[in-house]
Image (cartoon, rainbow, N blue to C red):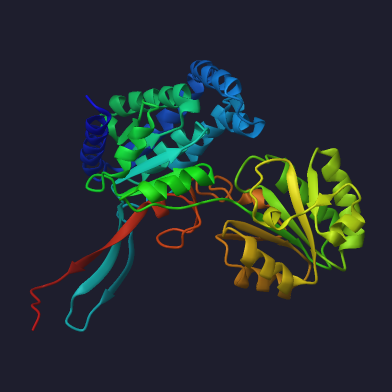
């Protein structure tokens, strides 16, 4: 069977599975999810053994330390995956929820009910935890999912998929509800992206090049998230000890992820007191600082920031820093260079905090907290299917509700239109 026929068969099976899933009770879905979490933990040695093959390949291919970090499965990573699935099981089921109801003058009772999207295709790089997170969210929301990870994680993804399908079988659920594409051929991605009659939504997760390629090729609607150029603005009256702690966490805790800090904006009045100390901590943590002229005057070790730096998603221990005149200049910078991902203000000024929340147009906006909280698990979504910087349908971290849509339901008692 050629790749075109193989992908069509995968999609056809997913479509049939999605019809069956829409009828499955919350109780059965939750039971299966809990068993999936248990299987992952019980089979941790098997999963890490398969993952070692991928890590060895990645190192041989010269992938960056940040990419290898995303790829690696440890016992703690697997426990986190299981915790995410259990949290999804504990969340309210959105399917069948009536979100509103109203009566028309002619007596018709009109409402809106949440329903699954149908079949979702996920195309992603490196992170095998996406396989478990996406499968759990799609199962709970009644969607079938087709998972196509990168070649660098093929053994890990297939192993996770096998464990999840084993649980589906044990619970008499359709195995095709969770399918991992087991070929690394790029043609498989192209063929999936043409199957608009079977697949309802495509969610790419990975670097900007991957997402732009998917958008160019797809005949199916795509949830886009090109990059995470995340900002923190340290206001004039910020608690500077707290600001330094937040900035260090946002940049260094895990620099290779999309919600890591990439540009630090500092109020001119706070810069002389703040920048030398935070720079010392950043430099000790291995961060390369690239700054504007005022920044370099306060941080001798800083390199010169170019115009391109303000647009960059480094995904590495590099930080661009700019001194600004106030909140308006900070918000103007974010509007010009940001990617609609995540921004935070560190301030004790309530009015400025509210302005920042109201006027910054990104999908997640925080006050006095790290950008690293822009994450479905951290926000109580259980896990996330991805982060959308596309405003249509969903915006920000996508959980269960964002994997459903609504249909109209109408109760009548014989009404006809005149």
Q: Position of residue 286 (x, y in %)?
A: 80, 38
Q: Is residue 183 left or right of residue 41?
A: left
The residue at 84%/42% (across/down) is: 283
Q: Is residue 349 left or right of residue 315?
A: right
Confirm whether residue 31 shows in the render: no
Occupied quadrant, residue 232:
bottom right
Q: Is residue 350 above or below residue 154?
A: below
The residue at 43%/45% (across/down) is: 213
Of residues 135 and 320, the one nearer the viewer is: 320
Q: Position of residue 183 (x, y in %)?
A: 36, 26
The residue at 65%/64% (across/down) is: 334
Q: Is residue 394 left or right of residue 331?
A: left
Q: Is residue 188 above or below residue 401?
A: above
Occupied quadrant, residue 100:
bottom left
Q: Position of residue 163 (x, y in %)?
A: 40, 23
Q: Where is the N terminus found, in terms of image quarters? A: top left
Q: Where is the C terminus found, in terms of image quarters? A: bottom left
Of residues 148 and 385, the one nearer the viewer is: 148
Of residues 26 and 221, the one nearer the viewer is: 221
Occupied quadrant, residue 170:
top left
Q: How many marks?
A: 0
Q: Position of residue 354 (x, y in %)?
A: 67, 72
Confirm whether residue 358 shows in the render: yes
Q: Is residue 115 above or below residue 105?
A: above
């Amino acid at each position: 069977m050629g790749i075109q026929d193989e992908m069509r068969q995968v999609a056809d099976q997913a479509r049939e599975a999605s019809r069956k899933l829409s009828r499955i009770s919350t109780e059965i879905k939750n039971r299966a999810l809990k068993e999936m979490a248990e299987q992952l933990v019980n089979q941790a040695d098997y999963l890490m053994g398969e993952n070692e093959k991928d890590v060895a390949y990645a190192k041989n291919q010269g992938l960056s330390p940040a990419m290898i970090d995303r790829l690696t499965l440890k016992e703690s990573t697997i426990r986190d995956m299981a915790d995410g699935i259990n949290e999804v099981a504990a969340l309210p089921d959105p399917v069948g929820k009536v979100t509103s109801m109203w009566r028309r003058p002619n007596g018709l009772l009109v409402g809106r009910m949440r329903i699954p999207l149908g079949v979702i295709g996920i195309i992603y790089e490196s992170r095998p935890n996406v396989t478990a997170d996406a499968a759990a969210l799609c199962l709970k929301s009644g969607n079938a999912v087709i998972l196509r990870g990168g070649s660098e994680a093929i053994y890990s993804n297939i192993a996770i998929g096998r464990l999840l399908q084993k649980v589906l079988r044990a619970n008499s659920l359709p195995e095709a509800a969770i399918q991992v594409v087991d070929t690394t051929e790029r043609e498989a991605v192209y063929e999936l992206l043409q199957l608009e009659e079977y697949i309802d939504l495509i969610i790419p997760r990975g670097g900007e090049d991957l997402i732009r390629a998917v958008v160019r090729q797809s005949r199916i609607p795509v949830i886009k998230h090109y990059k995470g150029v995340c900002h923190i603005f340290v206001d004039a009256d910020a608690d500077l000890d707290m600001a330094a702690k937040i900035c260090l966490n946002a940049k260094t805790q895990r620099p290779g992820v999309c919600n890591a800090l990439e540009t630090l904006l500092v109020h001119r009045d706070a810069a002389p007191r703040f920048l030398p100390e935070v720079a010392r901590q950043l430099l000790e943590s291995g961060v390369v600082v690239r700054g504007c002229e005022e920044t370099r005057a306060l941080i001798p070790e800083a390199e010169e920031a170019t115009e391109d730096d303000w647009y960059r998603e480094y995904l590495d221990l590099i930080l661009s820093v700019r001194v600004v005149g106030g909140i308006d200049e900070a918000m103007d910078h974010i509007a010009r260079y940001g990617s609609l991902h995540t921004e935070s203000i560190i301030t004790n000024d309530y009015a400025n905090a509210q302005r920042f929340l109201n006027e910054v147009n990104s999908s997640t906006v925080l006050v006095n907290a790290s950008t690293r909280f822009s994450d479905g698990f951290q926000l109580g979504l259980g896990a996330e299917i991805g982060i959308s910087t596309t405003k249509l349908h969903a915006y920000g971290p996508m959980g269960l509700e964002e994997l459903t849509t609504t249909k109209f339901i109408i109760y009548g008692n014989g009404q006809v239109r005149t």
